Image (cartoon, grey):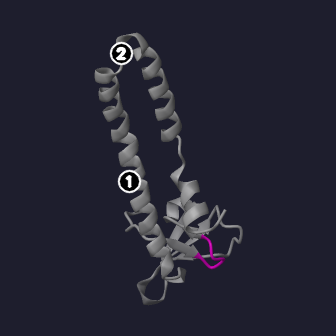
Amino acid sequence: MKHLPVAPLCSSDGIVFGSPCQAGCQEMCTGPNRTQLFTNCSLLTNSSAVLSSDQCPDSTLVHLIGFQYIFTVVRSLVITCPLISLFINLRCVVKKVRPLSLGLLTCLTTLISSFNADTFYAKHITGKK
């Protein structure tokens, strides 16, 4: 499949996907007004359902942009905060308790980095489970 712009795609059933690849689509055709239609998608329950950006409500793109913003902020914090806290830890913690402090830092970093932004977005922003 050739490169496609990032835009949400909605099925005729009302399911939203980020891309045709995410939906497992195998075929693409051109519909009315040169709209790209994706068919033969493995993740759609209805085999005759079609994916298209024309079927999405206007609020879908706003939600996608909101998700991208939240995802970028969270990932930036996950990347930068451990380094900052490591430097502070190495400079400010007494040498005797430094191994314990570094162990707790590693544990907290692992927990925070396993945070699933997709689940948070789906539950708290869109209201879907």
Residue 122 or 5: which is nearer the viewer? 122
Examine the image and state in which quarter residue 1 appears.
bottom left
Q: Is residue 13 magenta?
A: yes
Measuring 56% from the left and 56% from the top, which residue is drawn there? 120
| Residue 61 circle label | none
Camera sees residue 98: yes
Above-or-below relation of 89 to 124: above
Q: Which residues are magenta?
A: 11-15
Residue 53 screen position, x and y as percent: 49, 78
Which structural element holds mark 1?
Answer: helix
- Answer with the quarter of the image where residue 77 lies: top left
Label 2 element class: loop
Mark found first going from the N terminus, 2 or 1: 1
Residue 30 visible, this orientation: no
Relative to 13, residue 33 above or below:
below
Location of residue 73 in the rendering, given as x and y in whole percent from the top left corner:
38, 53
Query: What's the amino acid at mark 2?
Result: Val
User: Residue at left 58%, top 63%?
Assistant: 124
Which amino acid type corresponds to the residue marked 1 in the rendered image? Val
Cα separation between marks 2 and 1: 32 Å
Q: Residue furthest bottom?
A: 33
Q: In the rendered view, would you say 58 is above or below 83?
A: below
Of circles 2 and 1, the one toward us is 2
Q: Main secondary structure of the magenta part?
A: loop
Q: In the image, is 23 to the left or to the right of 129? A: left
Residue shown at the point (51%, 53%) measured from the top left: 117
**Is residue 32 on the magenta stretch?**
no
Q: Which mark is residue 73?
A: 1
| Image coordinates for residue 110, horizontal then vertical, percent | 50, 33
Viewer-nearest residue: 123 or 95: 95
As drawn, the label of residue 94 is 2
